[in-house]
Amino acid sequence: MNNAVQTATTVTLVVNGEQLTRQVSVRRNLADFLREDLGLTGTHVGCEHGVCGACTVKVNGAIVRACLMLAVQLDGAEVITIECAANDVITDLRREFHVRNALQCGFCTPAMLLTAADIVENNPQAGRAEIREHLSGNYCRCTGYQSIIDAVEAVCRSRTKS
Ligand code: FES
Ligand code: FES
């Protein structure tokens, strides 16, 4: 009888448009896999238990917390990180964050931009309360949120004005 415990496995996934096959520890979470194995350090790690939102990435089109997923769960998945998210929405959000001082230390910003892009792309009619609710899982210790909401609202309005 074989009592060996499997400690690593092979996963194949698409990260930022590139297909990769990697051997990963079965305990490796997605945030550490992205940062340490792939060098994608725009995914930040704060609380490491699903509270702060700093590790937000997109998996198969949905916003997820990378610290709460194991890399082995990603076999066959498509992952988008802030490094690849250079589309028009992100460009506009970056500009509005910049002109409105919607960041200070910047630790929360990559994840905040990905979460903000999600609401701009899927619900640009959102009002301030909806924007605030959508961003409520992303913590910022610096800005007080007002300028962040202002920036996201400005990009939403730019998409809905006739
Ligand atoms: Fe993942 Fe805080 S590091 S939610
Ligand atoms: Fe510092 Fe948000 S800008 S945590």
Image (cartoon, helix red, strand yellow):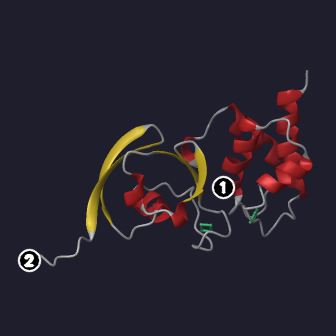
Residue 101 appearing in the image: no
Residue projecting furthest to the front: 1
Q: Quick one: label 1, few (<14), some, or many (20+) residues within 10 Å? A: many
Q: Residues within 10 Å of mark 2 (few under 14, many from 20)?
A: few
What's under tag 1, amino acid-wise? Answer: Ala
Q: Nearer the viewer, residue 32 or 70?
A: 70
Q: Mark number for residue 18?
A: none
Q: Does dot 1 land on a helix, a strand or a loop?
A: helix
Q: Quadrant of the C terminus?
A: top right
Count of picture labels: 2
| Residue drawn where x is 90% and y is 26% of the image | 161
Ligand 1 within 8 Å of disc 1? The answer is no
Q: Residue at x 41, y 53 (%)?
A: 74
Marks 2 and 1, the one that precedes in the sequence: 2
Amino acid type at image mark 2: Met
**Residue extending farthest left:** 1
Place of residue 31 in the rendered image (x, y in percent of width and height, measured from the top left): 50, 62
Within 8 Å: ligand 1 and the Cβ of disc 2? no
Quadrant of the rendered structure where residue 19 is?
A: top left
Tell whether 122 sits left or right of 68: right
Compared to 105, does 83 lie above or below? above
Q: Which mark is residue 111?
A: 1
Give percent across and percent down for residue 28. Answer: 40, 67
Left or right: 39 in relation to 41: left
Answer with left or right where residue 117 lies relative to residue 155. left
The residue carrying mark 2 is 1
At x 37%, y 59%, the residue is 72
Residues under labels 2 and 1: Cα distance? 47 Å
